[in-house]
Structures are given as C-alpha cells and as structure tokens.
Image (cartoon, grey):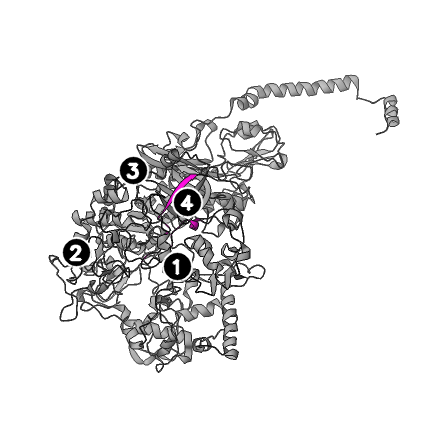
Amino acid sequence: MALQSLDITRRSATTTPSPSARSTEEVAKLIDVTTCIGCKACQAACMEWNDLRDQVGVNVGVIDNPPDLTEESWTVMRYAEHEENGNLEWLIRKDGCMHCADPGCLKACPAPGAIVQYANGIVDFHEENCIGCGYCITGCPFNIPRISKKDHKVYKCTLCSDRVAVGLEPACIKACPTGALQFGTKQDMKDYAAERITDLKARGFANAGLYDPPGVGGTHVMYVLHHADRPELYNDLPRKPAISPLVSFWKGATKPLANAILAALALGGIIHYVTQGPNEVSKELEKEEEENGP
Amino acid sequence: MTNHWVDIRNADVVLVMGGNAAEAHPCGFKWVIEAKKHRGAKLVVVDPRFTRSASVADYYAPIRTGTDIAFLGGVINYLLAQDKIQHEYVKNYTDFSFLVNDGFNFDNGLFSGYDPAKRSYDKSTWHYQIGPDGYVKTDPTLQDPRCVYQLMKSHYGRYTPEMVERVCGTTKEQFLKVCEIMASTAAPDRAMTIMYALGWTQHSVGSEMIRAGAMVQLLLGNIGMAGGGMNALRGHSNIQGLTDLGLLSNLLPGYLTLPGEKETDYKAYIAARALKPLRPNQLSYWQNYEKFHVSLMKSWFGKAATQDNDWCFDWLPKLDKVHDMLQVFDDMHQGKVNGYFCQGFNPLGSAPNKAKVSTALAKLKYLVVIDPLATETSEFWKNFGPYNDVDPAKIQTTVFRLPSGCFAEEDGSLVNSARWLQWHWKGAEPPGEGRTDIEIMAGLFTRLRALYKTGGGAFPDPILNLDWPYRVPEAPGADELAKEYSGKALVDLPDPKDKTKVLRKAGEQLDGFAQLQADGTTACGCWLFSGSWTQAGNQMARRDNADPWGNGETLGWAWSWPANRRIMYNRASADPAGNPWNPAKRQIWWNGSAWVGSDVPDYKPDEDPSLGMGPFIMNPEGVARFFAIDKMAEGPFPEHYEPFETPIGTNPLNNNPRAVSNPAARVFKADMEQFGTAKDFPYAGTSYRLTEHFHFWTKHCRINAILQPQQFVELGEELAKEKGIKAGDKVKVRSNRGQIVAVAVVTKRFRSLMVDGKKVHHVGVPIHWGFKGEAKPGYLANTLTPFVGDANAQTPEFKSFLVTIEKA
C-alpha cells in the first residue's frame, strides 16, 4: 500500500468536507529509544533536507545542542541521566512533533489552511497561511511549535511530508545508523514495537512498552520506552498528554456558540444594509477632505 | 579487524572496551544492535565513562583510565582458575604446551634482561626451548613448569579480583559479572567479539592491552569464529589503507619491513624475515617474503631492479631507529629538521604537548601543508589570542599551503576497518585551486626528478630510476596505481601444474599473491592487495551484496585483503579434524579432499587436517602465541604498568620504582621532566571524541558546529561539588604542560573510583575544538597531553594524564 496520499482530511478553521475516494494507510515514525545512541544524525539530516541552519550556539552545560527546539531546529535529542537501583541509565529521546491523531495545534488554529492533517496522519503547517497568532503553541500538549522572530510564522517537523509524498522515508529515518528510527504504516510500527518490547522484557525491563498516548487519539510518532510506566523520565515526556482545556473549550462546546454569534453579527449587517442602505460619504465631507489635502 | 563489520551481528557477546563504538563508529555500531535484536546478544561496556555505547549496554563496568591490562589480566586469571576455556581449541591452536627458555623470568615488575640505563630489554631469553630437531620442545600434558600454560597461570595468578578492584577501581562484583558474561563464550557454539579503538592504542602500554584482549579471545576459542575476533575500529577513513601501504617509518607496503642500519646484506635481510617453521609440517607463510619483496622492488624500480643488484636493495633506507611522529617532532624541537610536509595531518592539534609542537614548528625553515582545510598547523605562527598566543614576529618559518581535494573529489579505493577495499568515484571537482593529493605528489616528484637530472645531486639513483609509467606523468590515474598495487606478470608465467601452459601472459594482471615470484618476473606494489584488480577487472568496484550463506559474508561486495578473505584465521573455526566447532555458524570445513565453505580458506586449500598443520599460518609455530617471544618491547606477557602520569604514583602489582610505568617506553629527557605528579595534578585526565564531530575537520562545517558548538570538559557531580563548579560554568583545566578553558558539563556519567585506597576522579576532555573553523573558537586539547608513546607503536598516551581543574 502506498503511503503517499496528500489528501487532506482536516484543515484548520475550515469546514469543507475532505476527499475520501482513496483509501490511505496511516503512517508512523517509531523511535526506539532503547537502541538510540544519541548520535544526532537525525538532527543533521533534518537540517540538510529542510534547508535549515540554526545559529552556532553555545554550550549551556549539557551535551544537548541546540539546547531546545527552535524554528530552525525541528528535532533535538534530549539526554537524561537517571539512576535505577544504583545503576545509571542514560535515557536519550529524540524530541519533535508527535503528529497527533487529534492535533491540538490544528484545533486551536484560527487561520484557514495554516495547519492541515493528511489522510496518512501527518500534521503539517502551511506557513503561507499562518498569521503568527501562536494559538497552535497553546494547543500543543508536547510544547513543539516554535514561532520565528524573522517572519512571525510557526514551524515544526513536517514528518518530511514532501518526501513521504513521493514514497520516501523521512530524512531522519534514512540517516539513523542503528535503526532506532523506523518508518512505515502505523500497524507495522506497532507490530515491530511489540517485538522490541518482548526483547526488552527479556532483558529485565519489566515495564517496557509503547508510547502512543490515547489522550490525543494516539500519535503518528511513537516511542518504545524501557520505562513506559514513567515517560516523564525521558526529559518530561508527558504521561497523559491532552489538548489544553482552553482549546477544547474554544473549539469544542463554545464553537457553535461563537459561530452563532458570528452569524448573528453578519445577519445584523445585512439587515442594517437592507433597512439603512449603503454607507455613503456626503458630498460636503468629500469636498472638505480635498481642501485639506493629503 | 580480524573479522568484519557485518559479522558483528553473529556475536553472542559484544565487549566494547578501549573504544566507544556507538560514539565514534555509529554506522558500524548498527551491527551490535542487530546482534542484540536478532541473536539476543549481550553488550558489555568497560570504560572510565558511561558512554553512548554504555547507554545501550546490558552491563556497564567502570574502570580507571590506563588500567585495562590489570582488568584483562584478571579475566585471564578468572578463566584459567575457573577452567572456563575452550580446551580443544587452546590445546591444538595455541602455544600452551610450548616450553620456554630457562633463562626467562619475571620478577617484581620486570622481565629478564632489563637494562635501566637504556630503558630497554635484552630479549635473548624471551624464547622457546629448541630441541635437537630444530623444533620447539613441547609438553602436551601441560605439567612442565616451563610450559607457556604454567608460566601464564603463575603470571596472571597475581591478578586476583581483589587486585583488579585495587588497581582499576572496578568493584569485585562488577568485575566478576563481566567475567561471567565473557566466560559464557568458552562454549564452542558461542562467540564474543571485542571492539576496541584508540581507547587501547593511545596508552604507553597500548599494544599490550590489545594483546591481553587477544589472549582472552584465544582462551575462549573466539579467534577465527564468526561473531568473534579482535576488531580494531580504525579512527580515520582509510587509515587501514595507510598502514597496509606502509606509511610508517619502519614499514614497506604489505607489512614488509625496512632493513635496519646493520642489515646491509640482502640475503641476510630476507633470511631474517622468511621464517622457517618452528614445528613440524607448518606452513610459515612468511617463507614467501622474498617473492613479495622482489615484486615490490620490480614495481618501484622496473627494469633497474635486477638479480645482480639485489633488486636495488642498496637503495632502500637503512633505519637507525624508528622515526615516528614523536621522534620527528623531538628532532624538530632540537632544531635538527629543516623542512616538514604535512599531508592530511594537523599535528599542532593531533600531536601531544601543543607547546612543544608549536616551538618545534617555529624552528623549521619551511613547512608545507597539503590539506583541503585551513588547518591550525598551517596558521601555527598566527596569534589567535589565548587560543594560540604566539608572536608572529619571532617565527621565521615559511609556510606553503597547497589546497588538496578531499576523498569525494577523486576516484580511488578506501580500506575500511574490515580490510575491505571499496572503490569510489569522484563526486565533484576540487574547488578553486585544489588538486588531488596524487597530482600534488606527482607534481613534486616530476619537478624534483627534473632538478636531479639537470643539476645532479647526492644519491640520485632511486629518484631517477623510479618507474613512472603513467599516462599523464603529472597526474597518475587512480586506476593505474590500483593496478600497480595489485600486480602484473612481467613475462609469460608458466602454470606450475603444467609448465607447457601459460598462467598469465606478460603484462596481464595477476590473480593474487600466490602467483608472485622472487625472480623478477612479477611486479606488485603491495602483496596484500594482490588480486584487487585482476584481468577480470576492478574487484574493489564490485557491489554484489548476495549473502548465500546468510552469515553476512558477501564475497561479491568490494574486495577484502588478503585474497578476498572476510574472516582471518578462519581455519580455527573448525576443529582439528576439519569440522566446524559450531555448525550453525560454519565458515570453512574439510570435505575429504579440500577446504570449502562460505569464506576463502585461511589455510592451504588442499591440506589434509590429519597432517597437523596449525591454523595460524603466518606464525612459524603454526599456532597462536600467548607468549609473544621477542616480538614486544616490554615483555612476552602483558603486564600492568601505570600511565606515565599516574594518580596513585605507585604500581600495586610490584614495589619496584623502575616498574611503576612501562619500563621499556621511550621517553625523551625533557619530556620526562614535564610529567606532572598527583600532588599538583590529582585528577585522571582522558581525551576522547564525540559523535557530533570528526577529529579537527568537522568544526569547519556549519551543521556539525551547530550540533556541538563550543568546547567543554566533563566531570562528575562529586568532584564538581567539591570544587564549587556548576554545569555551564567556565573552568580552567591545567596539566604540567599547559591549560585550557572550557565550559563544564557536570554529569553522573563520571563517578569517583576507589583505587589503592584513594579516591580517583576523572576529568574528560573532548578533542574537537581549535582556533579555525565554524565552531566557537577553543583550545587544542593536546595542550594538556604528555609527549610519550606506546613502547612498540609510539602512539601517544592521549588517554591517561594528570590534570587539575578549577573555576575560571
């Protein structure tokens, strides 16, 4: 089954029905943190493919670099030193957009078509439509989107929608030397993760498991974790991510109400026009302005 | 590597020690992950630091830097005492039963024959007992107290788990856990691979650390096995090719050796190298030395090399001593060197004790730097503030910078760690005025030759007679050079099986080194590469990844020296009768009339195993050596010696002040005086690489600079607390040779170790910064490191030195 449909199933601030003639498989990136060596090849590949060149920064006392996601660093490795029964574990997690099935960013976005979700599950930002309001940042339960100071638009990982659209895997997957990053249909990734979890349990990680949080409808980027019972060990990966109540409130229960208010206002305008006629500038006023000059 | 990258997936246990494969070899490390995923392999990491490799390990044990022989000696003791060895393998394939010369002994840290004034050994007693038949005497019952087994047992009996804990700081429990996992591979159906790199080579006892690892592998029967072996992960692309082609002061291509200054007689030179078998019916393959040597001379000097002039033997330099990198810089420091060429080498960054190297370079009349990058070395004379605080007015060295292409800008082959010669094709032209290294060297050569022709000069013969048959003399083709290395027939070569037939016609490429001749009828630039470009074409360019046996031995992918063999010593993967020890992972076996299998046999192809020929055909013994006879500088058995800068100032394994550190390592007097002591520099410094960068190159690349922009040092939380250092603080790290300032990374990954009753902290110094490039400017890490090398290879002791650290 091809993975490359670019049919859009959801579009921010839009109610037009989505196309449904083609059947498209949902895709997923699987990040097996238990075989990740934190080499940052994914970061390099992301910069190369997406033509991103962040600042040459400084060292802030950790080996993470850049130290956080930015509009020019769409993925970063986060390193956590954790002691478990006297043994050190170095938990290394590739951070970036999770491509939620129920994307808080898209729900929060008021700009039509600035955020879309493809039929294959990828959540993509179309920056040309972005108005820079930053609502998507509030809407994201994973603290991923970053606003650019240069163009006041918001950026994040596209899951290389441009590569996937032509049948290629995302750049980070291609660069990963150990196979810690895998890409395929979501079901295949779940099956593969199950094998990894069996291996990890045999090695003593009783709580190994898959991170595919239901609070956001599952994600199209999933993690295999040694300690799936404590995702927060991995640099605060949320235990139960959910869309901010503010967004749910705004886009959920109140949305019909807001729409009703908007409709009422529009209707009011029409009534005003019908009853009062168009706004016309009086001849006197026009003349006055001409005399005063620009 | 004795084995190859893909083969690591066949391992049951992977020991990463003396290296950090995940960090420095992330692409090859995938095979470790494959072994873990698909074979349930256990990964064990032993390292002073909890590394990226350790982050995916099943077991990690800390160790004090520079004490790996104590650890491995402890493993040897454990395996012998617990009888966890592969008996049949060891009995048949090693020197266990060989009797050693009665004069040999070991006493309080020193082997017999030590001369403290010369800091070297008279090795005459480091040998076997030879019987009247000319062969080594043996005791197959292993009872004789002079047999290698008994000597070894007594030597390593001192390396108890308690001693390991005292020297290495690894707790007894941690040590025994590692032993237990390793010992599980003594079973014939299990194999362990050892992956090591500069963490073993960059010590004053580096070569012996590697030997100790090899001894463990022999005891476990893991050499020659799929998933086993001693696997050196090389630090530069094609550094394997550099050694293979003999770019070391005492080597010729293919590990042939230059004559010493007393070796003026050609026949004696050959006889000393064409070793006769030391046991009955052994192959002793180096008996063919003269064929390789003469073919090399024919390749270099063509028609000028004749039997009458001993194939130009007199033209070869005769070495007074090794002129390794440290020796050359010491000579330069003494003002004895006028000019220096650095080709793809940045010694200001890569050699120890930057201050000494900088002073030395300033004494040159001229320096030529051939490099794609503007290296620190090429601007050693320029002031870069605190990072390179020199006064250009006082430096008179003329520097020539010749911009070269990089690997992607030329055709050619690279030899990887797995000994594969992989051909590659030019991807782009060198930018600007850049020329390939071949063009630069050929341009220099043709001009020099013209000068000798017109102006004469001392000893012009080797220059004027060098065979230079290339299409474009100023730019020999990579194909022409590759064919020359592989070798050709100079006359019609008769088939040895049927003299009426011609095996190869004059001018044709040879099939392999078995066709080389000592009578001047063949030419071959590197016997080990013979067969890489045959009449059938460029074997290195092959890209068939078919794996018919499912064991990763893709014989149609590129070409592996020697003879396209993928696993060295693979005869040892079968038992003495010729049946695989482990049928599930068989390599080669005897089918009743020939050796067959998935790999090219490392053995005489039609040798009936009942005749007793050993599997280690390059050794005149036919077996592998635990007892190294006179091959090593500091002794036939690896013995623990402290780094020259030791945090404990004593060697717990002896009480001999002469044997604290390697008694046979060469130390120049002024450098000895520059060693620091634990009183002033209490912390164990160690330098290393990071995944984000490659040596001193990638700081010139924007993306790598983004990923790791600024120089830092790592220290443990306990030491940081003691010193009031917080993560992100600027710190000053000093050794007795200089200081650097960097950002502190405070980590749990370094922990203090209890060593000989004393708490020892490590300070980690990644090497990648300098004052040129895209990354933030930094200090060259080798400002700190001591000017001393391994006693055999002279590789500098970058991994173990003393520092102190404070807030800047």
Mark 2 vs mark 1: tell me if same chain. Answer: yes
Q: Observer-nearest residue: B576 or B521?
A: B521
Q: Position of residue B717 (x, y in %)?
A: 38, 35
Q: Which residue is mark 2?
A: B151
Q: How far apart are labels 3 and 1 at the CA level?
A: 50 Å
Q: Is residue B456 visible?
A: yes
Figure quadrant of residue B324: bottom left
**Residue where numbered disc 4 is placed:** B734
Amino acid tagged 4:
Arg
Give the residue at mark 1. B326
Which x, y percent locates residue A78? 44, 37
Asked if badges 1 and 4 are on one and the same chain, I answer yes
Q: Residues within 10 Å of mark 2 (few under 14, many from 20)?
A: many
Q: Chain of mark 3?
A: A
- Left or right, B800 with respect to B430, comes to left
Question: What's the amino acid at mark 3?
Answer: Ala
Residue B796 part of the magenta segment: yes
The mark nearer the N terminus, 2 or 4, is 2
For the residues labelled 3 and 4, the Cα–Cα distance comes to 46 Å
What residue range appears in magenta? Answer: B779-808
Image location of residue B23, percent across then percent down = 40, 46
Disc marking residue B574? none
Between disc 3 and disc 2, the foreground one is 2
Q: Chain of mark 1?
A: B
